[in-house]
Structure formats: C-alpha cells, structure tokens
Amino acid sequence: MPISPRAKLPLLFSALMGLCVLGAEGYVLTGLLRQHADGWQTLVAALFALVVFTVWLWGFYRSWRVLSQYSVEEAALPQATAALEAMAHGIEAGDWKRQSFTDAAPLLDRRLTQMWRGLQRGAPLLAGDRVESEDRPLPGPEREIRTYRDIALNVGIAGAFVSILITLGQPQGLTADALLTHAGPGIASGLAAIIAGIGLRLCHRAIQDEQDALAGHVDEAVSEFFVAHLPKTVTSPNERMVLATTALAQSAKDDLA
C-alpha cells in the first residue's frame, strides 16, 4: 500500500531498529545456551524476547496501515469538493442533511461532524481550530502506537532482569569476569527493549506528522469548498442573533397589530 514520501524515512529507520532488536534477542539466547542454562530457563527468556519483537513488528505493521489510510484519504480529498459544495448549498436552502465520508475520508468526516455540532449549537464557526499534534490529546492511532512502545519497553526490561537472574543462577564462580559474562545477555535484552521503543517512537512521530499534514489539507478543503459557500446567517452568531431579533420584533409587531 502506498504511503507518503515524508513517512518512508522514519519507517525505514524503524525497520532497521527492528532488525537490531532481532539481533540483540538472538545474542541473549545464544548467550544463555553458552552458559548451559536449563531448557525451561532458555524458553522463558525466549518468550520475553519473542514478545518484545512481536510487539515491535505489530506496531510497525499498524503504523504502515494507518499511514497508508492517510495517503488514501489525502488522495480522495479532491473528489470530495463537489459534495462539500452541495452540502453548503443545501444548508443555505434549509436542508441540514449531510453526506458521510467515513469510508473514503474519515478525518474529513470527523471534522465536518465537529463543525456541524458547533453550527447547530450556535457556536462561532472557527471555535474548533486545529492545533498541532503535540498540543492536542492523542487520538486513536497515536495512542495505539504509544501503547505498543510502552509494552515493548516494559516487557524488555522485565526480560533483562530474568536473563540476569538465570545467568547468575548457573554454577560458575562469581569472579569479576564471570559477573560480566552473566550480565551480557541481560544487558542485551534491555538494549533490545530500548531499541524497540526507539523504532516505535519513529513510527509514532511519522503518524503525528502525517496527521498534521492531512488535517491541514482537510481544513483547506472544508474552508474553500464548504465554509466559503455557507450564508452569513449560519457562519456568524451575530448575524443569527440579528436575524432572530428581527424575526421576534416582527412577530411582536404582528401580535400587537
């Protein structure tokens, strides 16, 4: 699936981080085997290593899918302009029914939903201006990738302690050289967790950047093809108040007459 050229470099570095995670976890397992750890002990350490790599791999895959969806929506925006103009003219005629863009452009659909609710409440049209991703609550995809990053890091740190405890339990003299040998697999396991976290952080940053870019294009399309065609009685609370006051005064005048 195609993704934006802006996101390809972060994903490439994240993929390299994933290979580093795989290599570090392989070093952990071979280190335990060299120290003649029991089979069940090696299996436990392998389970932690597998979870860290699997979480990174799933987070990478989900990031690729989300970024691909953003690219599809950005490509679909030009085809949505006619529908936006038609909705604006419908509102001017008193028809508040709107077309749903959920399948082709979910971010555009959410933006219109927010604007629709604001207009129906009589709020100023620009009260919900877009903010940068660092200044807004994390939406679904960002929150999802951040969760994977936290899981990979915490599981990897736990695996590091497990590897150290396993190696320290082997029947060897506790000399300085032996301690360093014991600590090697555990250090490598913790390092793999940090690398996995960095790789998922790159995916998280790419999603944030693409969200900001797509939100900018959505706002431009909404402003140019929807807001620009709305009557002032809809976009301006003051105009609506004047219109309502005029209608009320005319109704009172008719009653008194």
Image: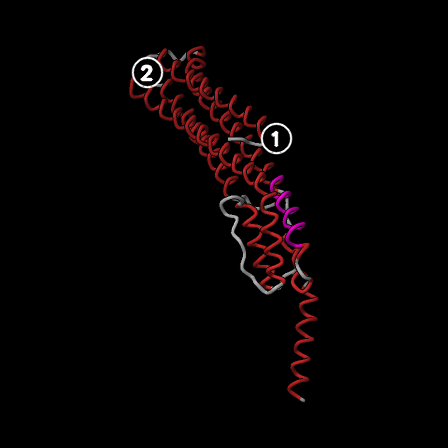
Describe residue 166's horizontal placement relative to residue 106 as left or right.
left
Q: Amino acid at mark 1?
A: Arg
Q: Compare marks 1 and 2 and give the one earlier in the sequence.
A: 1
Segment colored magenta: 213-227
Chosen colour scheme: secondary structure
Q: CA–CA distance between discs 1 and 2?
A: 46 Å
Instruction: Give the labeled residue for mark 1.
Output: 6
**Could you say where residue 119 lies in the image, as x and y percent from the top left?**
60, 61
Describe residue 61's horizontal placement relative to residue 79 as left or right.
left
**Could you say where residue 72 lies in the image, as x and y percent from the top left?**
54, 37
Q: Nearer the viewer, residue 71 or 194?
A: 71
Numbered circle sitting on residue 58: none
Which corner quadrant holds the C terminus?
bottom right
Q: Nearer the viewer, residue 167 or 132?
A: 132
Q: Amino acid at mark 2?
A: Ala
Instruction: Give the labeled residue for mark 2.
Output: 37
Quadrant of the image occupied by residue 31: top left
**Could you say where residue 148 lies in the image, as x and y percent from the top left?**
46, 34
**Could you say where residue 80 lies in the image, as x and y percent from the top left?**
58, 47
Asked if the magenta segment contains residue 225, the reply would be yes
Main secondary structure found in the magenta portion: helix
Label 2 residue SS: loop
